[in-house]
Amino acid sequence: MNSNSNGVEILSIGTELLLGNICNTNAQWISEKLSQLGLNHFRQTTVGDNLDRIIKVIQETSKRSNLLITTGGLGPTPDDLTTEAIAKSFNVSLFERPQLWDEIKQKLSNSKLNENSSSLRKQCFFPKNAQIINNPRGTAPGMIWEPIQGFTILTFPGVPSEMKSMWEETAFEFIKTKFSDSYSFFSKTLKFSGIGESNVAEKIDDLLNLKNPTVAPYANLGEVKIRITARAKNALEAKNIIKPVKEKLEKKFSKFIFGEDHDTLAKVLIKELAKRNETIVFAESCTGGLLSSAVTSISGSSLVFKGSIVSYSNELKNSLLNISEEKLAKYGAVSKEVCESMAINIKDKLGADWAIAISGIAGPRGGSQDKPVGLVYISISGPNNQITNIKQIFNSTLNRIEIQTLSVNVSLNSIRLILLSNSK
């Protein structure tokens, strides 16, 4: 397929997708595979288990695209309508493939066959000249069919493990041979913290109009990503296309970029502390262990993370972290003074090089005029008793989990910057 072709579309079939009962991971996975093959993928459609609507989408797609990949609706139940809908879209009949029935019988025990033999047999019917895609993980095969010149359909079951094994065994090579022009898409993602998406976009206006590589910013909660995508014949060629843009971004945003691709702030912190042979502990209040969870989810965290105390109540702040009742009464649990003491005391108590303490009001209740919902104090205690105090007031429209997550992000990014400035 050349770069001027009409491209590929994905059609996901299943009412459960429309109801939100399950997440459409198949479309995401197929999209990544199409990118690796360098194919133009312009549209995804999701439709319920309704024959007329499936037919309409297939007929519309056949007029504008070269390749349609469907997932779902290949099973034995009455609401599995994909193959029937495809045949009716082009006014052709379905014919039984006896060898498929033999294969299904081999895959299943007699008890299952006796219960469902008539419905399972439905999976053996295909248009006369369709090529069958073997299903090594299940009973529902797919097909490769060109009902009209210049338009091909590939069908897959909705079960992700079955779809993936069928793709790898049959579909990948077919699509690569028939539709790929030997170019592929390669991406490198840079990850930013401590800066907003609009701020990043303003500063890279000149890069956003590039054609190869393309540059696209997008944001998650507390994190901005810039994806640089090159169209190239191999990884080395792509790396050379991406390199000057990547270097330009790294120069412009040196302090804000914390990693690439699958890096997280927690992963970067663990790597840096391990390199320095230093340890860290946490004292958490409003985040309730979320900071500890972020760090311990990373393999190798035991090299640097010694433990934490989640001191939610004032009683535990007093008994476990030695915060005096007088200080708690005078400043309140959510205060710079108490948070700083939490960081200093946990570092001493657990014997670490670094400590982070977090105390705040995650809401939706508990705020006041002086201390609104979204107010969070973070204290970082380091070697030689160096102290860094951070006061954040997150937008009160954020929900509780979002405020907790952002508190963790700010904590991790703050210590990253401290370590960066004290790099050994």
Image: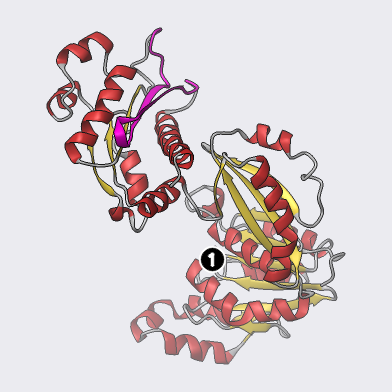
Give whichever of 125, 215 is nearer the camera. 215
Quick one: quadrant of the N terminus?
bottom right
Q: Position of residue 248 (x, y in %)?
A: 71, 47
Could you tell me how many numbered marks the image carries?
1
Residue at horizontal 29%, vertical 48%?
Answer: 305
Residue annotated with mark 1: 158
Q: Which residues are magenta?
A: 369-396
| Label 1: which secondary element | loop
Does residue 394 show up magenta in the picture?
Answer: yes
Residue at horizontal 85%, vertical 76%?
Answer: 149
Give whichever of 351, 384 is nearer the camera. 384
Task: Identify residue type, mark 1.
Answer: Gly
Q: Position of residue 159 (x, y in %)?
A: 49, 67
Position above or below: 251 against 212: above
Q: Position of residue 57 (x, y in %)?
A: 73, 58
Examine the image and state in which quarter residue 411 appears: top left
Which residue occupies the extreme left position in the image? 319
Position above or below: 250 against 373: below
Residue at horizontal 73%, vertical 69%?
Answer: 237
Position above or below: 231 against 139: above
